[in-house]
Structures are given as structure tokens and as C-alpha cells.
Amino acid sequence: MGTDILKAPEGAPSRNEHLKKESNFLRGTLKEEFEDRLNGGVSEDANQLIKFHGSYQQDDRDLRNERQKQKLEPAYQFMIRVRLPGGVSTPEQWLVMDDLSEKYGNGTLKITTRQTFQMHGILKWNMKKTMQGINQALMDTIAACGDVNRNVMSNSNPFQSELHAEVYEWAKKLSDDLLPRTRAYHEIWLDEEKVFSTPEVEEVEPMYGPVYLPRKFKIGVAIPPSNDVDVFSQDIGFIAIVEDRSLLGFNVAIGGGMGMTHGDKETYPQLAKVIGFCKPEQIYQVAEKIITIQRDYGNRSSRKNARFKYTVDRLGLETVIEELHNRLGWRLEEAKPFHFDHNGDRYGWVEGTKGKWHYTLFIEGGRVKDFENLKIKTGLREIAKVHKGDFRLTANQNLIIANVSTRSKKKINDLLEHYGLTDGSHFSALRRNSMACVSLPTCGLAMAEAERYLPTLIDKIETIIDESGLRDEEITIRMTGCPNGCARHALGEIGFIGKSVGKYNMYLGAAFDGSRLSKLYRENIGEEEILNELRILLPRYAKERELGEHFGDFVIRAGIVKATTDGTNFHD
Amino acid sequence: MQFQVGNSPFNQNQVELLNQLLTTLTDSQKIWLSGYFAASITNSATNAPRSTETTSKPMKDITILFGSQTGNAHGLSKKAGATFKENGFDVTVSAMNDFKPNQLKKVSNLLIIVSTHGEGEPPDNAIIFHEFLHGKRAPKLDHVNFSVLSLGDSSYEFFCETGKQFDKRLEELGASRVYPRFDCDLDFEEPAAEWLDGVLRSLNEQEGGVHQEVAATTMTAPTSTYTRSNPFKAEVIENINLNGRGSNKETRHLEISLEGSNLTYKPGDSLGVYPENDPELVEFLLQELPWSTSDSVTINKHGDILSLKEALTTYYEITVLSKPLLQKIADHTTNEKLQELLSAGNEEKLKTYIDGRDVIDLVRDYGVWGSSAQEFVSILRKIPARLYSISSSIQANPDEVHLTIGAVRYTTHDRQRKGVCSTFAAERLNIGDKIPVFVQENDNFKLPENPETPIIMIGPGTGVAPFRAFIQEREEIGAEGKSWLFFGDQHFMTDFLYQTEWKQWLQNGTLTKLDVAFSRDTEEKVYVQHRMLAQSKELFAWLEEGATVYICGDEKNMAKDVHNTLLQIIETEGGLSHEQAEEYLTNLQQQKRYQRDVY
């Protein structure tokens, strides 16, 4: 293998690279800036660094213009994202998050598409207290954002509880072991005494080094037949291989990612490709070596092209596999066969092993909030107070009340009924398979509404669905406010990316099991046009579909869109 | 013998010199002198005849001392001074604190024009003089003629208290009252003019009719076209709420056009605004009255006529009760309960009743008074103008004046109450509306004349208003002096008044330092004085460099706390005793380096 192929792209390092380098392992000016009282926000540099600590600076975009007239600065506030491997939370942790969101946040919690809690609206002066509250509940926010390995996702399928527990332990270990080693987080938020010495870089960050990764890095672990974590959307996907109810190991897939930039065809969503198999105990080593390949050869000049997927496509999959084998000192085994059915959640009560029950609750848009007529937040608080099992935040923004004993089941059920919390069975299957990112008003990247708008759009689509007799037909629909794709729009059978306020690009043709990307169908259209298109497409699907054929497959067979066979032809 | 201005033809200066000389003369020297003068004057008179009138007739001196918080007493003093000058007096007009107490011995005619502040306290620039006069070191004033004009607000319990105290004390010290004290309510022009007329006449009479022709007093005559009694109808060109969503407060930023008025002002001055009553409140009142809303009433001496509804909306005060008002009403009603409330022994009860209630409560509790709408309204006081510290520099905003008004709303006695002018601005004043305004000078709150003098500004809440004017002005004239603002309020997110402007001034260097305290953002309440204490070393260094300190805003809590904090800083950082620190601060005050605009 020629070493000339194995190199990072040329070009001056981006601003963020300098920033990381000069940050003294993610400290920068954070401590000083968070003590300053004159500014509600922090500097742009600090804003980049704080991501590594699990937070973004945002502002309430609804109020921007109004506040400008009032001679007030934007309503700066912070989002905090917890690192919650596999989305598993104890009832105690749930209660802490609930309390912190009331005390310091905007009173709501968001269950993210990467299985964790997100809190919005935290003021600068409350950040430390919030971080400490999270830590006291044995959680943290380290590396929940930033150019490092993020929250590791893991299947939350309640059918196979024992396997889930085993796979979860691997996911958690992966998440913990891949954490940055710097003590910056502990010093800044937890008042840990600073050690006055200048250790070598290798001592501080043996894996990441002083400039960390070129871009964010995501890992997900799936247990077939459920692909709820969208394993192919990850930089590294691990697919659990089970034989005779025991875990053999994992197939390894590399090079997935959803983000792209409008108008730049050099950027595209991509799916991870399966490159082999490893044993459970090899999972950390495999991940570590893959991460170091990205560390060494990823694009540090252009952040738009810095994700691992571009590194893989640029170097070539075979080259990367070869390099991985070299770094491992051994070769991955041949990938084992596997089969996925779906990437959505299965709702309602399910009996698991050892007499434990699991209830998957439908939470639209993942927003845990007390609405006028639906007190989700209060209801879950009351459940958390009596629940003896745990909670699992799902990759589809829902919540599993897991490990409920037969004895407790009635109590939980009564509370669910009392607060009107349901499996969503009274909604269309379309709504139950919907996902939306946060978007406006807090996300700085948002170009159009997502979470606040999708429910009302679905109201209108449901009319068409009902007329077509498709109420119980599962179709995934996903909306993101910008092309970065937090809601994995490119894997929705109906996908929307925000272009500008009220306008979306509409995508069709993704596979129901998350194994095929979608294709652009209509560009820059508003609600009327969206509904007009669906008024033609959905009845046609209802009429012409074959037995068991999913909507995403139908639109391709019917020639409505061309299949995207690889991210590189997503724009074709 | 001792010469006095009153018993000799000499003026003050001459009297002093003569007295000094005479005590040293022997009898023979005195005789020699008398012969010398007799001869020399006869000579010069024959050589160059002169108007004996001007030389022989003594210039009568008059000293006008004022104590003023908002500038009314100061303004009146200046006008009184002008009037006396026109009538041939040698006039001295001075703020009480600028007047050297030992000069009192040399004063023969003394006028006191003083307002009362807060709970019966003298205004800032009267405190020292007030203390001196009431202390043991106060001199005998047998030689002094005096009269007092006191300003106040009858809705306060200690109405015109400071004026009353001066009046009483001067008498105790042996001075003779040439004209009785007048206690003026907020609507002070007419009584003040009357008082001045009276004083002038009495002094002239004492003089034995020397000055036959008394120049017309010009107390109410405008020095510029638009005044308190002839306000300018100014157009509102901007009206925004400065508090962000979710705030407990509402602070209006008003921009008002002065175009065509020729009105001008300096940073630190106030704008007087005549508000209208809340129509809803007027409606409540009208429902209690037996008369038709369209009954016409005559509202003033000029015979202007308005309908009852209009008069209650635009002319009469209906939101405040006072003891004098209730006493007047008692004369027009037979209601026994009211008579009883006013009778001796019920003072506490009366005070409690008045507190927080308005005319509607009164009518509901004690019935209507008078037999006609006319009789009913005649007892009410005219809506007084509200004074607001101007928050703009006219240099920076030609033909404009900006105000920063906190809307006052609270519930008491089972009803929501609203500040008349503040909610007039917040709820009913639209862009394009015209409101009657006038400029009220305030010489007690002014930027240092030297633009290089450092300034320390302490102004939480709406107290920040004049400091916006200060900084606008300093930016406009390119002042080089350092500046330091302490601002505070409840919440950073919603209550940081003029946030973007301060930040910009901080960035471009017009403002040197900014410290903020938001009391409800943290569990422990933090106020401006805590921020001052945290930087006491630097603050004291600024004082030592000659900085002027300004406090603007709430008097009851903030201004007292800040004052004590300043003392503490001076004590600690200056290594002084408490008494020395007090002296240090008094010194600053006398040098006009410690100025307050508190309310």
C-alpha cells in the first residue's frame, strides 16, 4: 500500500484547528468567560470549545428582532446535552433532569435522536450549577458535542432484554473509554483543583492528541432485526451478531453520516459499509484504531468535508480497511449475515425476560413538556417517582419505561392512563414514525421550522392518509431544519430539509430498514405544494403497492425517484 | 458704636470695614476724621456736583438661600433674585450649602426657598445648612428680616416640613418675619408669585416707601416661551418597552420631539410631563357621582370650561388623597364618619386610611361631597406634572428629548393601582400623540465642567436615565474623562436597560468601566453596592483622582445603601475613622463631587 495515498488533504488548517491547538486541552478562556457578568453569551472561540463540554451557545431566535428594538442583546442561552450511553437513565436521574430543566432550563426536556437528554434555555450564570447537578446524578456532558466521539447509541429493543443489557454494557464501555482525558471539564464545571504541571501530550490525550478529531464522530450499536439506531448513519456502526441467544460479536460498518451543505455537491449523506466482524472484547480496539485513522487523515482544512465518511471515500474503502488491519495488527473476520426489518420503535407493553415488562411511550418530537391538554412532563415525573426499573431514551425520540415488574405494571399503567400518556395507537402510523430535530427557535443553524411545525403538517397529511386507507401503514417521515440532518432526514421515507422559513426540500425513497438513502424529489417547496404532491403519491401507493411493500421501495419501483445506491450518487 | 446696614447709610462691605476701623480709633482721631470728611465733601460738592441720590441712598441687600432637589426652589430663587434686583436690591442668591454660615451675621434680609424631600427631609443641598442652623453654633439673628417659601407635595405626610422648620427656627434665633410663610403644593406658581409680591411690598414698606415704584413681579412670566405653566405640546416619536419578554417590569423608553419649541436642556435636567388620568378610573368615579358626565365645570381662574368627564380626565388629580384634601372635603359634607375620621385622636387612623387610597375609594366609603359637579371638582387639586430625569443629550439628539419611565402597577385595597403618568406612557401614549412638557433645570446634577474629570455613576433601574444622557453628551463632545457605571435590576436577560448601547460605549471607550448587579439571577440577592464594595480599592482611587460621584434612583433603599457603602469604602481604603469618612463625603458634596438625583 503506497504511503502516498495515506495522507490528509492539503490546505491550511481551519480556524477551529488553531483554536483546539491553543486551547490547552479544551480550557481556552471558558473559566473566565463563564465568570464574566457583562455578557450573557461567550465569545465565538469559547462557543466552539464549549461544544466539547456538551453545550452550545444559542439564542431565542423568535425574539431577535424584538430585542434589538428594545436595545437588548439577543437572548443568549445555552443548550446542554447529556452523555447518556445507550439512552439508559435511572428514575433518579430522570428526576434530576426534570428538576434541573425546571430550575435552570426552559421547563422542558428534549429526547434527542441520539438517545439523550437535551436541555435548552440555560443562562450563563446557571451553567455551572446545572453541570454540577447532572454530575451529582452520576451523569456528565463530556464530549456530548465537539470534535470527538459523541454519545454512543445502543439498541433499546425491549424484546431481548438480556441481550440488550449485554450490548448496552459494551456501548457504555465504548463511550467511557473513548472520552477525552483532559481534566478541563472537571476544572471548569466541577471546581476540581488544577494540577500545576505540564504533562506530555501523550499523557493527556493518548488517543486524540492536542487537536482532537477533524470533526464530530458518532458510533451506534444495533441489534437486528431492529435498526432503531440507524446503524448505517454512524461513523462506526456495530451490528450485534447473535447465535443461540448469545452474543458472538459485532459486524463493523464504517463511514456513514447524514450532514451536507445546501448547494455543495461535494457534501452528501452517506451510509456506512460493513467491512468485517470482531469479537465483543475487540470492539474498543477496533473503534480506537478507526478513530486514529480519521485523526491522522481526516480533512482539517475544510470542516464541510471533514467527517470520516469523506475520508473513507477519498482514501478508498479498501485502503482504509488495510490501514485498519495494519494498526490492529490483526484482520477483522468476514462479516456475518444479518437482517434488519425496520428503524422505528415498537410501541406499547411488551413482556421481556424474567417477568419484566417494557412500555414504549410515543412522545411526539421527543419533547417532554406539559402541554395545555397533555401533561407529559408531570406524568413522567410521577412515574419516575414510583418506577423501580429504568428508562430508555430511544433513537426515535421516544421513551421506554423498562423493567417493570408484573406487580408494578398496574401502578405504572394507572399513571399512564391518568396523564393520558399513550403508545400513540390513536394516531396514524405515519405520526408514530415521525422525527424532527429541535430547529427554531433555539438552534443557530436552523433555516426553517421542524419540531414545532411537523405535527401540524402531519395533521394535514393524515387527512390524505385516512382518505387513502393508509392509517395503519408505517411510513417514516422526518424533518430537519437544516441540512446537518440531526433527524436523519436522508433515511426517512418522506424526508424534509429546511431551506428557508416555510420552504423545504422534499426527499423520497429511503428504505424502511435504514439501508438506503433517499433522493431529492422536489426543491424549495411550501406546505401547499407538499400536500399537493402527497395527494398524488399516497393514494397511488395505496392503490398500486405490492403486498408488504414499503412506501420508500414503492416510489423507486414506480419510477417516481431513482434509488440512491451510494452517498456519492445522492445528488444525481 | 457698631455700624449696621440697617442703622447706617453704608452697605455690608463698608459696614464691615468701618466697624473694623472704628474699634481701633481714639476719640481725637474720630474728631479729626469727622472734620476732614465734612471739609472734603463740601469741596467736591462744589467742584463736581453729583447725584446725592445714588451715593447717599444705601443699596438694600437681600440674600436668597435655596434648598432644592428637583430644581424648582432653585428656579424660583433665581426669578426672585431678578425681581429684587430690578427693585434696586443688592441680591445674593445661593444654594444653602454653598453659603458660608458665618456670613449670616452680615445678612439683613433673608429669604428661604426650600423644598421638602421624602419623609420630611431637607434636600441634599440644604442638609448641612439645615443642620448648622438647628445646632448650637447657630448665631443670634436679631438683625435679620426673613420670610420662607416652602415647596412640597400635600400627598405626603410631612408636607413642607423643611420650610416649616426653617420658619420656626429663624424666629427662635431672633429674626423677624416680614411676611408669613407660604406652603406651596405641586402647583406652586401662583402661590409663589403671591408670596414674592408680598415679601417685596413688606420690605419696601419697612424701607419707608423709598422705592415707590415696585417692579412687577415676574415669578410666572416665562423666561422662554414654554414653561411649567405654559408647557409645550410635544409629539411622541418613539415609545418602546425596554424590558424583554418575561420581565416583571415594564420600562418605557420615550422619544419626544422638541422641534419648534426652542426648548433646550442639559444632561441632568428633568422633563416635566402632564399626564391624563386613566379613562377606566374616571369611569369608575363617574359611576359613583350623581351628576351627568357632560355637566360643565369651570376649572381655573381664567374661566376655562370642560365637561365633568374631561375635567376629571385631564385636569384634576383623582389618584391621591391627603389630609388637607380631606379637611376641605369635610367642610362640604355632613358625613359624620368622615368628620370623625378627621377629629382629634384619630390621626393614625386617618394616615392609614389615606395611604394607598384614591378619590374613588373616598367617594365609595364616605359618599359624594358638594351639591354640584362644580363644587365637587373645585376641592380637587390640579394634576401635577411628573418630573423625569432626561435620558438623552440634546447635543447627540438635536430637537429630541428621551425619557425612561418605569410603569408603576400594584394592587392594594382590593384594586389594581397604576402610576398616573407611567401607565399613561405605557398604555395610552402612541407615536404621534402630543403631550404637554416643560424643561426643569437641575443644577444639582450636572456633569463636571472639566470633561477630563472622571465620573462614577450609580444608577440601578430607571436611575440609569441621566447617565445615558451623560455618556451621550461625553461621546458627542469627545470628553476624555474616565467613566464608570454601576447598573442593576432584577434580571440580566430582560432588565438590562439600554444594554446594547452600554456595550457599544464600553467597546468604543466612551464608557471606561461597567459593573452590573442582577438581584434575581442568583440565589443570593446582589445589588450595586455589593459590586462597589468588591472594587473598593479602585473606586477609592478614582475618588482620590478627583472623580465626581452620582447617584440616581430609588431613595428609600438604594440611595441610603449606596451612601453607606461609599462611607465604608472611604473608611476602609482611606484608613479613616467613620467621622472622618463622613467629613470626606461632606467635603465631596460641597465641592459638588457627590451629587444625587433620588426619588
Image: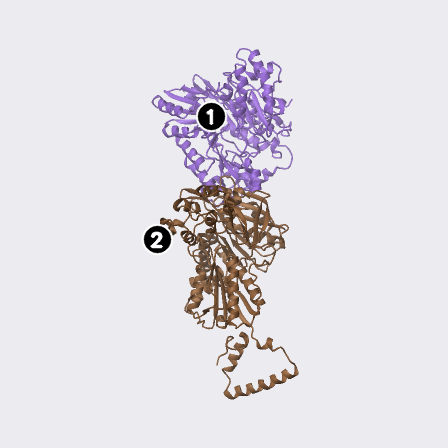
Q: Where is residue A263 in the image (x, y as percent from the top left)?
A: 64, 28
Q: In which quarter of the image is the C terminus of chain A?
A: top right
Q: The residue marked by circle 1 belongs to what chain?
A: A
Name the residue beneath numbered marker 2: B346
Q: Nearer the viewer, residue B385 or B473?
A: B385
Q: Position of residue B122 (x, y in %)?
A: 46, 60
Q: Residues within 10 Å of mark 1 (few under 14, many from 20)?
A: many
Q: Which of B131 and B520 is in front in this view?
A: B131
Q: Looking at this rendering, what residue extends furthest in the front direction?
A: B371
Which quadrant of the view contains residue A161?
A: top left
Q: Looking at this rendering, what residue extends furthest in the bottom direction?
A: B28
**Residue at 59%, 86% in the rendered image:** B39
In front: mark 2 or mark 1? Answer: 2
Q: Position of residue A547 (x, y in %)?
A: 53, 10
Compared with B65, A519 (above or below) is above
Which quadrant of the view contains residue A318?
A: top right
The purple one among the chains is A
**Residue B566 at least partly seen:** yes
| SS state under label 2 | loop
Name the residue beneath numbered marker 1: A363
Q: Where is residue A208 in the image (x, y as percent from the top left)?
A: 53, 35
Compared with B19, A356 (above or below) is above
Q: Residues within 10 Å of mark 2 (few under 14, many from 20)?
A: few
**Residue at 44%, 36% in the rendered image:** A102
Q: Tag on residue B570? A: none
The brown one among the chains is B
| SS state under label 1 | loop
Residue type at the position of mark 1: Ile
